[in-house]
Amino acid sequence: MKIWHIILQWFLALVFAATAGLKLADTSPGMTHTMFGSLPHALQGLVVGAELLMATWLACNWRPRWSAFCTIVLLATFLCAILVEMGQPNPMPCGCLGAVSEGAARPGLWFSLTMDSILLMGALGLYFWPEKALKTRL
């Protein structure tokens, strides 16, 4: 496996683990005034569970093309939620990074949009340029 594949998979896994951990660690009352905090508890658990599952799956390198595809779907879902919230007259902060993302809504949403877009490009790279396609003939 090419080293950039491994680095990218581990980077994505660490980002998912970190964002899930930040959500789990945040107990501040301000978190309820975010997109994530306003979700029902079951849906919050589903989001955190999906992030932890993706982190584990990417780190294990089991069926890497499928894990890249599922990462693309998860990140696209997050991007759609952010874009819908940005279209609201009074948007809420994302809450994607726990208490870190509290504060002014629009700049935080732009940050989350940018971060998720960059992560999506990495996942697309893992999916569309699998390891076999990168092998060069000598």
Image (cartoon, helix red, strand yellow):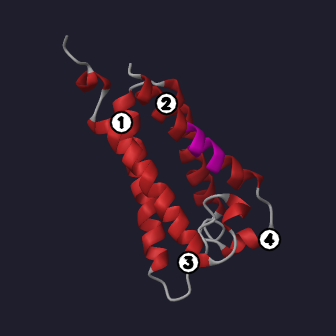
State the CA–CA distance, disc 1 to disc 3.
30 Å
Picture quadrant of residue 70? top left
The residue identified by callout 1 is 126
- Helix or strand or loop: what does disc 2 sit on? helix
Which span of residues is magenta-colored? 13-19
SS majority, magenta:
helix
Labels 1 and 3: the sequence-earlier one: 3
Direction right: furthest residue: 28
The residue identified by callout 2 is 7
- Marker disc for residue 29: 4
Q: Is residue 23 above or below residue 127?
A: below
Q: Can you give x and y, in whole percent of width and height, for residue 46 in the image?
A: 57, 52
The residue identified by callout 3 is 106
The residue carrying pointer 1 sits among few (fewer than 14), some (14 to 19) or many (20 or more) residues within 10 Å by Cα, namely: many
The reply to whether residue 74 is in sight is no
State the CA–CA distance, disc 2 to disc 3.
31 Å
**Which of 53/95 is in front?**
95
Give the mark toward the camera: 4 or 1.
1
